[in-house]
Amino acid sequence: MTTSGRSAPRRKTSHVLANAPFRRLWTAMSVCSLGDWLNIIAITAFAAFLTRGSGYQAQSLAIGGVFVVKMLPAIVLGPLAGAFADRFDRRLTMFVSDLLRFALVLSIPIVGSYRWVIIATLLVECVNLFWVPAKDATVPNLVPKERLEEANQLNLLVTYGTAPVAAALFAVLSLVVDLTAQAVPSFTWEPARLALIVNAVAYLVSAALIFTLKGIPRGHAGQVAAPSVLRQIIDGWRYVGANRMVRGLVIGMLGAFAAGGAVIGVAKVYVLSLGGGDAAYGTVFAAVFAGMGLGIFFGPRVLSELSRRRLFGLAIVTAGVVLAGTALIHNLVILVLLTVVLGACAGIAWIIGYTLIGLEVEDAIRGRTFSFLQSLARVTLLLVVAVAPALAGLLGEHRFSVGAGIAYRFDGTHLVMLIGGLLAVIVGVLALRHMDDRRHVPLRSDLLAALRGERYVAETAEQARGTFIAFEGGEGSGKTTQSRLLAIWLRDQGFDVVQTREPGSTKVGMRLRAILLDSTHQGLSARSETLLYAADRAEHVEKVILPALYRGAMVISDRYVDSSLAYQGAGRELEPQDVVKVNSWATGGLVPDLTVLIDVPPSVGLSRFASPADRIESEPLDFHERVRREFRALAAADPDRYFVVDGLRTQQEIAALIQDRVREILPDPVPQETEAITGTMPIIRD
């Protein structure tokens, strides 16, 4: 692909992390996020350790209690924490919050009682509510407005990207404790105790970074306190309830989070039931978020040709099937692998959902929609991870005999995951029904084509009864004359014939033709030209070609998609695949039953004109040579559809050859002997 002219050099801008104050805050956020995720893993593991002798139900309820106290502060204290961040020194707020979290987390392994675990966890979550809005309100004060989006992307990266790092760190700490216990028999620490100490140190490091941070304005910065979670949910539902597509998005994204939350909530007890320890639990936890990362970055790329709305629903359905399989297969290694797939599906659904909301929701209410979704997602995730282990504990542990000497264990954790999987499948199907934008395309065919890296082209005219014939060729080839002669001949045989052309067969097309062929528009860019031809073609197909085909007519078109492939793809030297995609979308994938190519050397075709009459004819000879080569290449690649005729023959010879070829595709038998074409045929300019 070539470009004309020379573009002005773009000034290279520095990365947002080159901003020293923001880099320091971002580093503190990274350490805190790592500590937050490590805290979740370590607290649940420590709660299970402290109640290890109380039975299966007690362990499950103990872990559920931890998640309950982590959820309550967000609902109760959210408005107060937001107002606090707008009225007090934010740097001091974050610094004191980090010190309090350090002291509280460090006290958990020192006190070593489940009651204090619950109290300390509740207090830590309360402190978190003050740290987070202070941090969010600080970021816009440290970076320019034009870099705020980039800064928010980095914040999102550390918010979720540190989860697998924390899980891996917990697994490593567990191995260190196990190896130390083997080397020193008197060493009786459990891995969760060491993880909590490391977690506390992370908060202390963050406090030191925040203390040295300069440039944060004191007091409030004119920000408005965020509404409560309940208020955001009410405002969000007002819009979601009125928009079918967004409603499907929200239902699907919450279903994906619920499926992931079900795994996190019962993972500890489930891993223990399979004979795994803290290291295995950390691995499963890491697998969920590692899968999410893979899904976010690679899922949409692998299935790039599949409709995003369809991929969204399919990802959730797949997540449900995988979750159900996880519940039924009792193998730790397979559990980890399935958890990665589950996380990947959740990641695909989350990134597609966010992207579609950004594209589909109008700017005036986009912020409230995102805020609503984030709040509801957090509540849903925490609610599921709180209820799931409690429900698993209430259901208890059961064993079933399957034949002689074979027992199958199916306890509360398995049932919770199975129910979660079935609910995810239902939610995914509902989301797909709400959002499907290719209902006319079979889902299986669409998916198989996407796996091959292709976009499934629907047979747009599959219900049509007519026949579509296109004429192609270079300037002066005689294709317009031959298309008219074929139309006359077919009408003589009793067929309903619609003769048309491109561009200019519709009201819109006539205006586009004036622009495209006007020799005064020599400065029209190649891409603009391609899109204008595609726009004309879209109108042509919808308003002229398809209606005629549906009623059973014979449609004869002077030029169609292959002209764009030859003129814009080869002539203008654009990327062929780009031209193919644009025109495939514009036509809905409609392909002629027969394409007649009148092949004439450009020097001969152009010599038939006294002078160039339009912008295309005025192009230099090498342009037309490229067009001819591309037409011939297209014909060679698809000989079943193409019929190539030597344009240097006489009009009568060419017409007879075309009629013989058309007889092979006519729906009804046509007499083999037709009246000879006599007289002088009018020459129509091509």
Image (cartoon, rainbow, N blue to C red):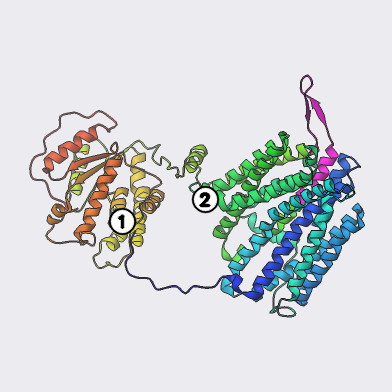
Q: Residue at x 15, y 32 (%)?
A: 674
Q: Give the number of callouts.
A: 2
Q: Nearer the viewer, residue 39 or 238?
A: 39
Q: Secondary structure at mark 2?
A: helix
Rendering coords of residue 413 (x, y %): 78, 39
Density class for disc 1 (Cα within 10 Å; few <14, some 14-19, many ≥20) is many
Reply above or below: 221 against 354: below
When asked about the image quadrant of residue 165, the answer is bottom right
Density class for disc 2 (Cα within 10 Å; few <14, some 14-19, many ≥20) is few
**130 in the magenta segment:** no
Rendering coords of residue 457 (x, y %): 42, 43
Q: Residue furthest front?
A: 183
In the displayed structure image, the side of residue 215 where residue 48 appears, left or right: right
Q: Secondary structure at mark 1?
A: helix
Span colored in magenta: 383-412
* Residue 171 in sight: yes
* Residue 504 in sight: no
Label 2 to label 1: alpha-carbon separation: 27 Å
Residue of label 2: 301
Closer to the eye: label 2 or 1: 2
The N terminus, quarter of image: bottom left
Reply above or below: 367 against 593: below
Residues at marks 2 and 1 touching, judged by CB atoms closer than 8 Å: no
In the displayed structure image, the side of residue 441 where residue 635 appears, left or right: left
Give the residue type that dot 1 points to: Gln
Residue of label 1: 568
Rendering coords of residue 109 (x, y %): 87, 56
Give the residue type that dot 2 points to: Arg
Q: Residue furthest left?
A: 679
